[in-house]
Structure formats: C-alpha cells, structure tokens
Amino acid sequence: MAAQWKMASTRQIYGETLLEMADSFPDLVVLGGDLNVSVFTHLWRDKYPERFFDFGPAEQNLIGVGAGLAASGKIPFVSTFSVFGVGRPFDQLRVLVSQGNLNLKLVCTHAGILTGEDGMSAHGIEDLSLICALPSFTVISPADTVETVQAVELAARTEGPFYIRLSRAATPVIHDADYQFNLGQAERLREGGDVTIIATGVMVSVSLEAADLLAEAGVQARVLNVHTLKPVDVPTIAAAARETGAVVTAEEHYLHGGLGSIVAQAVGQHCPVPVEMVALQGYSESARAEELMVKCGLTPEKVKDAALKAVSRKGG
C-alpha cells in the first residue's frame, strides 16, 4: 500500500495555504521565530511583509505579542518548531492564551522525531502532553497534507486557541480530494472486528500498513484516524472498544500524555478492554527520519505485534 501513496510535506502545504487565505481573512497576521524558511512562513513574509512579524529566537515574546494581537482583533498564526513553540513559552501559552481564551493559532512544524538530523534537542516528543493540558486549546495532529489544508482553514474561521502539529519530512498522502475534515470526529479508515488501531499524525499511514499485515495473518483491524486530540471523539473510541474488544494506539509522541493516555482514559471510563500502545519511550539521537522510526519501533510490524498482543489479552 505504501508504494501507492505519494509523499508531500505538511509544513510546505501550511505555508502555501496561508497565502491562499490572505484575501479571505484580512485580519490574519503571521508571526515567526527565526525559522521562517524551515516552517514555510517565508512565503507569507515575502508577499505580505506588512502583515508579518519576526521575533527571532525569543519564543516567550513571540507568544506574548501574538496574544496581544489576538486581543486586538487580529487572527495571529504563530509558527516555529514544536520544541520552541510549546515547551519554551509554556507559561505564556498558559497564562495569556489559554486562560484568556484568545484567538491565537499555534502551528508548529518539526514535531516528534521526524526532525531527524537536528538531533535530540530538537525532537518535540512532549508537545501533545503539554498543550493538551491547557484548557481552551483545540489540538489537531493531521495525518497528511490534505487534512492539514482543511485544519488550517478551519482554525482561521473558528474562534479560540488552536494547536496544529506538523512534521518536517514529507509523509504519505492518504486522503483524496473528496475528503472532508470534521473537527472532533474520528475518521474510520478501515473496517475490522478483531481489534481497533487508533492512530494520529504520521502514524496513521503506518497503521494502515499494519492492518494489511494483520489481514494476512487472519486478523481484521479497524483503523481510526484521531486527528483531533482535543476535543477527542470519545463516543467513536468507546464504540470501537466495545465492538472489537481490543485497542492499539499509535503515535509519534512520548508514551505519557499523548494519544495513548487520552484513549486509555476514554476506554477505561466507558468500555474497559485490553489496550496496547506504540509510542516513543524516550529521546533519540541524530539520524535520518526513517532510521529513527525503525529504531524507535514506529513501524507497521511493531503496530501489528501490539495488535496481536492486545487480541491475545481479550477475555474468554
């Protein structure tokens, strides 16, 4: 299946989507933090310099000014790497944006370990746990470029703080042009009655490949794309747990506080079943993205193994 997918960059489509929205959203402004070429906001900077503000490596100030612009009626899109956009200015995100419920859109690229060669210090593996802990924020982790375009457009026209998580490397495009993004509603990508694989972001395509491997072994896996982690689609998750009797989560994020924790809470409250988690166990090192995915166990084979383990734990 993977060979049939084209590859495309969510960070690049983000920059291009901003340009397409400029006329429709005259109050939209873009704020950068010294990494504008890397996050593709240089496209906006070059075309709309009067609506662009660069703060260099001063992320607390970046969020503070963004909050001020939001309070003044603008729609600020603030972009940098996830480690700099979430971790470094967390207090500003908490006090100014979340507590004020301001209309700031934080779109961070280079999340997870797909930052690759930039090394451990640039691997954003804790961003989802941090941002999901903040009330008011809507949190989206798109599976591909098609979903990214619609998520960015929806964030622009929806009041309140948003966090959208994007990657560095090009990733598989699993959706076609007819796809409709529905905020807060998990997408069922594949039917199956033996186990449910619940994935987000770059692990959605990996999970679809894992479902193919499971089918070869006689196990039919349902695959859910949970693109919205907050608010999460509890009814769909609970129904999948009840109908298949076992759940696996797959994410390119630290084990604690991300998708696995969110799903486990929903399943534990509504329909307790065996849950296995495929996620990062800690920090990694500098290497190509594909090498890190293999070393950290974020592969179709590892998702398949976790699914088989979850199935084996089903009650009689």
Image (cartoon, grey):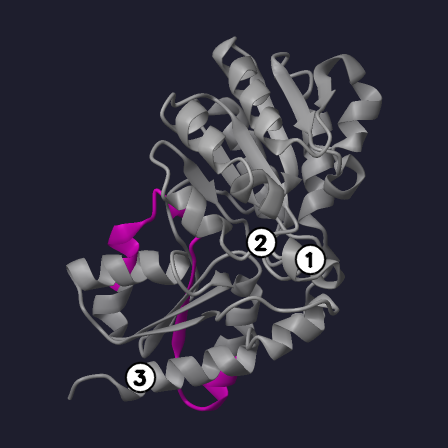
Which element is circle 2 on? loop
Q: Which quadrant of the view contains residue 139?
A: top left
Disc number lying in front (3 or 1): 1
- Callout 2, which amino acid? Gly
User: Any magenta on residue 289?
Assistant: no
In the depicted structure, whether residue 44 falls above or below residue 135: above
Camera-side residue of 276 and 239: 276
Judged left or right of residue 206, residue 199 is left
Whole-percent x, y for residue 143 in the image: 56, 54
Neighbour class for label 1 at 10 Å: few (<14), some, many (≥20)?
A: many
Residue indicated by mark 3: 311
Image mark for residue 124: 2
Camera-side residue of 180 and 103: 103
Judged left or right of residue 207, residue 172 is right
Residue indicated by mark 1: 115
Q: Which quadrant of the view contains residue 274?
A: bottom left
Q: Which quadrant of the view contains residue 310?
A: bottom left
In the depicted structure, whether residue 160 falls above or below residue 116: above
Upstream in sequence: badge 3 or badge 1 = 1
- Badge count: 3
- Callout 3, which amino acid? Val
Image mark for residue 93: none
Neighbour class for label 3 at 10 Å: few (<14), some, many (≥20)?
A: many
Q: Can you say which quadrant of the picture contains the C terminus?
A: bottom left
- Callout 1, which amino acid? Thr
In the depicted structure, whether residue 195 falls above or below residue 313: above
Which element is circle 1 on? loop
Camera-side residue of 89 and 218: 89
- The magenta region covers 212-239
User: Residue at position x 40%, y 75% from top?
Assistant: 221
Upstream in sequence: badge 1 or badge 2 = 1
